[in-house]
Image (cartoon, rainbow, N blue to C red):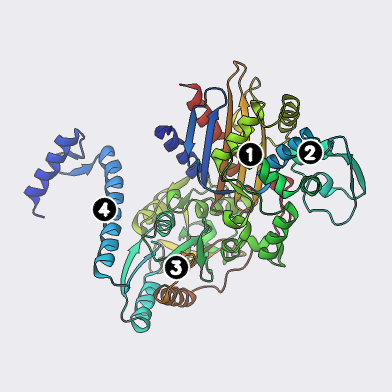
């Protein structure tokens, strides 16, 4: 079901913000959809922490791991990142579910790889496959993703991203060589978590709780500045890429899964308009679904 | 086309569409707002038709000798002349079909393979492209000759505060447009208004009538204009950055010859290779760390 007038407005919003974007939104209960490039193959980056979260809970449900099991995080050899365990200095011991909290709430890369080590890439791909996500695949760990990015950027570090030749050669931005999905696959996954289909109801509730604890206000949530509307989600970023997939819940019971993936023309790290358009596009899509 | 048949055709279109395209008085004819909107779409339609015809021609002839290339509107005339001479020498068998297109338009046509090679204005979305080296032409400011800042040897961006800025329409290259405004703000210049201007005479009129300023590379400034002057910006914070680009994996001999020739031609007037900007602080919400 394609709704073309909505697609035109959504694409105009993307263009105004200086990005190219792909979106899919679905009404979790009626199944109605809004498609603006829903089947475009996209790099997930940290959005792939959502499939990892789902795989973790499915493994727990199958009895192959215990979420209260302690995991040991040594001070060295951590997957780099600016938040959570990745930014902490000392040895830590925490439960798998608390590592999952850090992974989802602040996109902690170290916590994500601790969990991935325990769960395994194959289980992540098995989970998405079993839930009917035919175009979603994890090819590598977050450490490997960042190592490839670092290698391609070169020794100069992030300032080399100002060079368009450097941006053009980043393997991390190529969906064929990176963890990838489509907007439609991601809303399918979110809907299965909200419909208690991704795991049993207790596990799905635990996942919804974590997605609701994500701290970032600048992307999807920025499109819904309404105190009675709840936004839960998971972001993902790489140079020029800004993504978020999430669920928007209205007090009248309406619930909508939205996936937005964008690529900016500018390699600048700070592009507030590019972050905010994820919220604008999501709101346009949700409005379209609610006006039916 | 002779005048009476042209008028008749326009009137027929106006009747068919139910839209007035021109306002006519006994003395002058001017285009309506509706006419302007339709003109934009008609131009796009014509451009697409040309691309379609070119592709069809290439297919029907079985020729590989046709090279579909594009340059942005802000490339200096001398650069184009050097480019064309160079290409004639290097690839005499290649038939060049050269278009003048904005970066936004070039990206669309590279993606749809309606263009073989283009000269992009950076930054822009380079996904799926291969790039030749990026060359940098530093921008100075064009001012009314009697502006107080016109006496300075180099002008700091902050000294322009209070002046409106004349800048190309954003849709032509959105990321370049935004980057210029961000750099101005970073250096203490937030223009009260940004006015769209493109053609040199329109820009000149705005410059003179409204105490606005514009940016231009050395060489594009109106040297002989008695009323305007060009000054470098202190610290060269702004530049046009261009490079040849083609779809990844489609750089055949003709494409490479074009890219090399255009890089050479741009290099004659460039300030040198592109330099990366200063330090870049990733923020925690960036999620990645390199």
Per the model, the C-alpha gap separating discs 2 and 3 is 44 Å
Chain letter belonging to callout 1 = A
Residue drawn at the location 40% of the way across and 53% of the way down? B208
Dot 2 and dot 4 within a common chain = no
Kindly report which numbered mark, 3 or 4, lies closer to the viewer in this rendering: 3
Residue identifier under label 1: A130
Q: CA distance from mark 1 to mark 4?
A: 49 Å
Q: Is residue A283 left or right of residue A216?
A: left
Instruction: Quadrant for residue B114, please give it.
Output: bottom left
Disc 4 designates what residue?
B46
Q: Nearer the viewer, mark 1 or mark 4?
A: 1
Task: Identify the residue at horizontal 93%, vertical 48% (top origin).
Answer: A91
Image quarter for residue B183? Answer: bottom right
Q: Are marks 1 and 2 on the same chain?
A: yes
Q: Earlier in the sequence, mark 1 or mark 2?
A: 2
Q: What is the chain letter for disc 4? A: B
In the picture of the structure, the residue carrying the numbered disc 3 is B250
Q: Residues within 10 Å of mark 2 (few under 14, many from 20)?
A: many
């Amino acid at each position: 079901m394609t709704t073309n007038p909505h697609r035109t407005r959504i694409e105009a919003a993307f263009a105004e913000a200086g990005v190219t974007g792909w979106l899919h939104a679905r009404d979790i209960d009626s199944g109605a959809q809004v498609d603006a490039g829903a089947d475009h193959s996209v790099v997930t980056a940290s959005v792939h922490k959502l499939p990892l979260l789902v795989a973790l809970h499915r493994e727990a449900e199958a009895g192959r791991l215990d979420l209260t099991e302690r995991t040991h995080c040594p001070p060295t050899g951590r997957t780099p990142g600016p938040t959570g365990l990745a930014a902490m200095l000392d040895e830590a011991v925490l439960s798998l579910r608390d590592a999952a909290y850090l992974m989802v709430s602040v996109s902690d890369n170290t916590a994500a790889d601790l969990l991935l080590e325990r769960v395994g890439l194959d289980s992540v791909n098995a989970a998405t496959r079993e839930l009917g996500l035919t175009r979603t695949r994890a090819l590598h760990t977050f450490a490997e993703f960042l190592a490839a990015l670092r290698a391609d950027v070169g020794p100069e570090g992030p300032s080399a991203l100002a060079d368009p030749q450097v941006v053009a050669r980043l393997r991390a931005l190529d969906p064929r060589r990176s963890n990838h999905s489509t907007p439609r696959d991601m809303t399918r996954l979110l809907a299965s978590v909200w419909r208690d289909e991704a795991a049993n109801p207790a596990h799905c509730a635990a996942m919804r709780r974590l997605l609701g604890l994500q701290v970032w206000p600048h992307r999807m949530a920025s499109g819904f500045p309404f105190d009675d509307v709840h936004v839960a989600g998971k972001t993902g970023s790489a140079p020029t890429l800004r993504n978020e997939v999430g669920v928007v819940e209205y007090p009248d019971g309406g619930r909508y899964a939205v996936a937005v993936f964008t690529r900016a023309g500018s390699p600048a790290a700070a592009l507030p308009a590019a972050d905010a358009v994820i919220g604008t596009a999501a709101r346009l899509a949700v409005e379209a679904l609610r006006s039916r | 086309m002779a005048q009476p048949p042209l008028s008749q055709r326009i009137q027929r279109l106006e009747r068919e569409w139910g839209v007035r395209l021109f306002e006519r008085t006994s003395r002058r004819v001017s285009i309506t707002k509706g006419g302007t909107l339709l003109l934009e779409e008609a131009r796009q339609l014509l451009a697409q038709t040309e691309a379609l015809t070119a592709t069809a021609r290439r297919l029907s002839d079985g020729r590989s000798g046709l090279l579909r290339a594009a340059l942005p509107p802000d490339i200096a005339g001398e650069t184009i002349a050097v480019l064309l001479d160079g290409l004639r020498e290097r690839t005499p068998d290649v038939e060049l079909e050269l278009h003048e297109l904005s970066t936004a338009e070039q990206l669309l046509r590279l993606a749809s393979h309606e263009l073989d090679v283009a000269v992009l204005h950076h930054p822009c979305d380079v996904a799926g492209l291969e790039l030749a080296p990026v060359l940098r032409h530093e921008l100075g400011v064009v001012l009314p000759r009697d502006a107080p800042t016109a006496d300075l040897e180099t002008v700091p961006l902050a000294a322009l505060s209070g002046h409106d800025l004349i800048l190309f329409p954003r849709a032509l290259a959105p990321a370049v447009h935004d980057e210029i405004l961000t750099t101005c703000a970073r250096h203490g210049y937030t223009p009260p208004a940004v006015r769209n201007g493109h053609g040199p005479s329109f820009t000149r009129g705005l410059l003179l009538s409204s105490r606005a300023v514009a940016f231009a590379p050395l060489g594009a400034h109106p040297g002989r204009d008695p009323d305007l002057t060009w000054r470098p910006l202190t610290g060269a914070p702004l530049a046009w950055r261009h490079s040849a680009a083609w779809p990844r994996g489609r750089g055949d001999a003709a494409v490479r010859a074009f890219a090399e020739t255009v890089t050479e031609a741009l290099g004659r007037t460039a300030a040198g290779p592109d330099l990366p900007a200063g330090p870049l602080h990733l923020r925690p919400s960036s999620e990645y760390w390199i």
